[in-house]
């Protein structure tokens, strides 16, 4: 029974927390690069970043976790 519980916990960590931390790290790095390229970032750049880049990063990170899961 303990082996099954540990397997479930490891799957949960792999499919939930790893993509979350990967997404946050990717978005933070991309935002720092954007601020470096264009120091006076306006609200349009921020909204574009939130609407386009963040979902794409989430899709890629969750997809990578799902592929490694199988």
Image (cartoon, grey):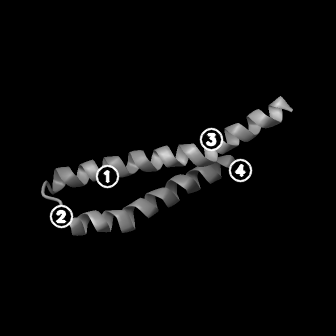
Residue at x 68%, y 37% (from the top left corner): 10
Alpha carbon distance from label 2 to label 1: 15 Å
Residue 42: mark in rendering: 2
Residue 26 is situated, as x and y percent measured from the top left of the image, at: 39, 49
Alpha carbon distance from label 2 to label 3: 36 Å
As displayed, is residue 31 above or below residue 51?
above
Q: Which circle, 2 or 1, is nearer the viewer?
A: 2
Q: Which circle, 3 or 1, is nearer the viewer?
A: 3
Q: Quadrant of the N terminus?
A: top right
Per the image, label 1 sits on a secondary structure element best described as: helix
As displayed, is residue 1 above or below residue 35?
above
What residue is shown with label 3? 13
User: Which label's residue is closer to the chain start, 2 or 1?
Assistant: 1
Q: Which circle, 4 or 3, is nearer the viewer?
A: 3
Residue 3 is situated, as x and y percent measured from the top left of the image, at: 81, 31
Alpha carbon distance from label 3 to label 1: 24 Å
Q: Nearer the viewer, residue 68 or 5?
A: 5
Residue at x 51%, y 52% (from the top left corner): 61
Mark 1 neighbour class, 10 Å CA radius: few under 14, some 14 to 19, many 20 or more: some
Q: Residue furthest right?
A: 1
Alpha carbon distance from label 4 to label 2: 42 Å
> Quick check: marks 2 and 3 in contact, CB under 8 Å?
no
What residue is shown with label 1? 30
Per the image, label 4 sits on a secondary structure element best described as: loop
Mark 2 neighbour class, 10 Å CA radius: few under 14, some 14 to 19, many 20 or more: few
Residue at x 32%, y 47% (from the top left corner): 29
How many labels sit on residues? 4
Per the image, label 2 sits on a secondary structure element best described as: loop
Residue 5: mark in rendering: none
């Amino acid at each position: 029974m303990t082996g099954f519980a540990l397997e479930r916990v490891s799957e949960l960590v792999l499919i939930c927390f790893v993509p979350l931390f990967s997404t946050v790290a990717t978005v933070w790095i991309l935002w720092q690069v954007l601020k470096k390229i264009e120091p006076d970032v306006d609200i349009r750049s921020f909204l574009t970043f939130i609407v386009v880049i963040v979902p794409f990063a989430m899709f890629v990170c969750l997809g990578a976790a799902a592929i490694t899961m199988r």
